[in-house]
Amino acid sequence: MEVVRRNTDYALRAMLNLAKHYGNEPVSSTELAQQGQAPYQLVCKLMHKLHIARLVKSCMGPKGGFRLNKDPSNISLLKIIEAIQGPVRLNRCLLGGDVCPQQKRCKVRMKLAELEQSINSFLGSVTLDELVRQRGAKRKNSAKNPARRKR
C-alpha cells in the first residue's frame, strides 16, 4: 500500500526545492525536474496541479518559473499531498457513504480511522520550512564531523 504515490513524492521534492529558494528568483520546471530527478513533462503537470491549489505561482518570461505562493512555514506536507493525489485514505470504507454494510459496527474500520487521523495530523504538522531547516542542520553537523560524512 502506498500512502504517498510516486508523483506526489516528486511534487514534495519540487516544493522543498522551491522552499529552499523562497524569496529569491523563480525556479524553472527544467531545474525542478533535474534536481528532483523527475521527468520534465511530469513536473510540468505537477506544477500545474500545485498552481491550481494555490500553493505555487508561475512567473512568465526568460527568467520565469515557479515560486511558493505562501511562506514555507504555512505549507504542510498534507496540503501538497492533497493537491496532487487527493485526501489520504487508508481504505474505501473511510470515504463515507454506504460502501460496506458493516460500516457502523466494524472494529477494524474504527482502528483504521484512528490511524488515518494520526497520519493526516502528522502530515499536517510538518511544514516545508521545518524540512528546509532540518536539512540545513544535518549538513552543518556532517561538516563539523568529517567521520560522519564518510559513512
Image (cartoon, rainbow, N blue to C red):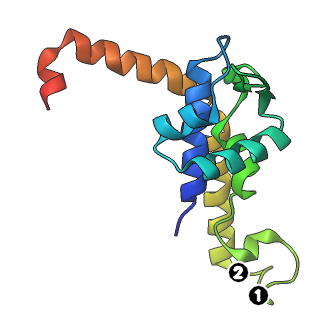
Q: Position of residue 117 (x, y in %)?
A: 68, 53
Q: In the picture shown, does residue 28 fall above or below 141?
A: below
Residue at the spot of label 1 = 102
Which residue is the extreme one toward the right?
A: 97
* Residue at the spot 53% in from the left edge and 64% down from the top edge: 2
Dot 2 crowding, Cα within 10 Å, few <14, some 14–19, many 20+: few
Q: Mark yes or no: residue 4 visible.
A: no
Residue at the spot of label 2 = 106
> Disc 1 residue type?
Gln
Q: Position of residue 91 (x, y in %)?
A: 67, 73
Q: Residue 29 versus residue 91: which sits nearer the camera?
A: 29
Discs 2, 1 touching: Cβ within 8 Å: yes
* Residue at the spot 57% in from the left edge and 59% down from the top edge: 5
Query: How many numbered badges does the structure rendering display?
Result: 2
> Disc 2 residue type?
Cys
Q: Position of residue 13 (x, y in %)?
A: 54, 38
Q: Residue 21 versus residue 3: which sits nearer the camera?
A: 21
* Residue at the spot 61% in from the left edge and 23% down from the top edge: 19
Q: Quadrant of residue 99?
A: bottom right
* Residue at the spot 45% in from the left edge and 44% down from the top edge: 37
Q: In the picture shown, does residue 42 fall above or below 33?
A: below
Q: In the picture shown, does residue 111 fall above or below 66?
A: below
Q: Position of residue 11 (x, y in %)?
A: 61, 44
Label 2: state its secondary structure: loop
Locate residue 105 relative to residue 30 in the image: left or right. Answer: right
Label 1: state its secondary structure: loop
Q: Residue 18 versus residue 2: which sits nearer the camera?
A: 18
Locate residue 88 relative to residue 2 in the image: left or right. Answer: right
Mark 2 to mark 1: distance in Å? 6 Å
